[in-house]
Image (tube, rainbow, N blue to C red):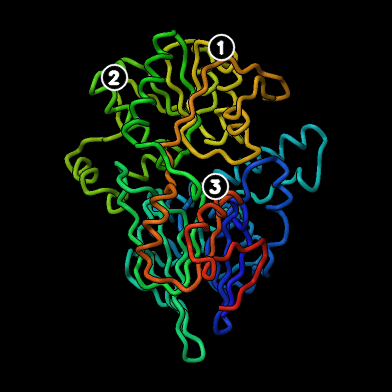
Amino acid sequence: MKLSFHGAAHQVTGSCHLLECGGRKILIDCGMFQGSSELHESNAADFGFEPREIDAVLLTHAHLDHCGRLPLLVKRGFRGEIIATSATKDLARLVMMDSAHLHEEEARRHHRHGLHGGPHEALYDTMDALDAVDRFGRVAKLKQAIHLFPGITATFYDAGHILGSSSILVSLTENGRTRKILFSGDIGPNNRPLLNDPDPPSDADIVVMETTYGDRNHRPLDASITEFLEAIQQADARGGNVIIPTFAMERAQELLWFLRQGMQSGEIRKSLKVFLDSPMAISATRIFARHQEAMRPELAALMDKGIDPFKLPDLHFTQETQESMGLNRIRSGAVIMAGSGMCTGGRVRHHLRHNLPHSDCSVIFVGYAAEGTLARIIIDGAREVKLFGDLVPVKAKIHTINGFSAHADADDLKHWLARTGHPERIFLVHGEEKAMQKFAQGLNPKTVETPRYHATYEL
């Protein structure tokens, strides 16, 4: 039995772990490296294994840094089965198709400027993404073991991170010995309004766990909601717009829920125009409605009564590019939610270009921003940023509200780990160096590993 790490090792993105047992090779996640533009080479590089030799992929959830290289895996020869929950399958299709479209658009833009080859070519295209969708096979149901191969089973458990997200327990038997390896995926915080709390198994021998916020706790959710609504009210009173760089899945829906509550309570005015300017977020919101089994029972009960928990009095979905461009003519009184959350691409960059120079406007960051991303650069206090070749002054009021994170904080991570039993070995992944080291300080040093990129361990 072997376990190797081909992403999210001493870094936050690119989750990709390989199990080998009984002549079989099973991949857990195959995600995109995200952050600075220089990561194209990392995404295009060899995986560290031969895609044709992979027998199956187990997908924890549909975020790009967990599923984003599946089309490339298929393009390079993978012909096995991809297994995920029903909601993850629907969302992953959305994410991979969107990613392929962005790669194609970027390649066309480079070609128009006479640039060809290497980093100027699309990593994969729409047909590759559709081929990856075709590899999805059996649908995982929570706490029901799936027989993969002789001596190998996988069981999915609720991770509470985004719709359909799971931690996966893989049971391996070889030469009469059985080992249970738990892959956390991304772990959600407790007591969120839309999703159930994480619910890991209690009998893991080995745990591979994320540590994105392993070095700190989030502020209380109630305080974050109050700050969020106050920031919107203040910008509205100044006569400016509010730009919210938004992750399309879970975050966008959660913010719509909080805006709905704020309007009902009178903390913000009901006539405020809210624009969800993200085709992917719009589609994800519709997918939410199809998967009540993955939500908190209270939310599912509302939907059963015909109540849309994400509907606002003056909510506008802007699907088309021309509609999005029209938003840049609005100078006041608008809340614009647009992707990407880290401002690495998407429509939000255009809205930042038009609103950052105005002191009456606000930009509200409500999620994690990896090092090197435009979001992190603005959060860290840049006086000006480069957008579409121009230097844009940052005069808008900048708010950073980390209490909305879909990731567990340090205390939640410790609580989750304590519920997994008494693992003999713990591999810390999906975190920056300082976060992993801080989290490791509270654990038995004899049990903890922080694997390097492409490192292999005997189990």
The residue type indicated by label 1 comes to His
Residue 202 as seen in the image, left or right of residue 362 = left
Mark 2 vs mark 3, CA separation in Å: 38 Å
| Dot 3 amino acid type | Met
Left or right side of 320 for 114: right
- Residue 202 in view of the camera: yes
Q: Residue drawn 28% across and 49% down?
A: 292
- Left or right of 144: which side holds 405? right
Q: Choose between 103 and 387: the one closer to the eye.
A: 387
Q: Residue furthest left?
A: 305
| Residue 289 visible in the current orientation | no
Crowd tier of the residue under label 3, counting other residues whose Cα lies within 10 Å: few below 14, some 14–19, many 20 or above: many
Q: Pick whichever of labels 2 and 3 is earlier in the sequence.
A: 3
> Closer to the camera: disc 3 or disc 1?
1
User: Is the Cβ of the residue at disc 1 closer than 8 Å to that at disc 2?
Assistant: no
Q: Is residue 96 left or right of residue 301?
A: right
- The image position of residue 389, as x and y in percent, is 73, 24
Mark 3–mark 1 Cα distance, whole angstroms, equals 35 Å
Question: Quick one: SS at disc 1?
Answer: loop
Tell me the residue that label 2 is attached to: 267
Pick whichever of labels 1 and 2 is earlier in the sequence.
Answer: 2
What is the quadrant of the C terminus in the image? bottom right
Q: Which residue is mark 1?
A: 358
Query: Which label was assigned to residue 97?
Result: 3
Provide residue 182's location: percent of width, then percent of height. Answer: 45, 68
Label 2–label 3 contact, CB within 8 A:
no
Label located before the other in sequence (3 or 1): 3
Residue 188's mark?
Answer: none
Few, some or many residues within 10 Å of mark 1 (<14, 14–19, 20+): some
Total number of numbered discs in the rendering: 3
How far apart in space, not on screen, are marks 1 and 2 (Cα)?
24 Å
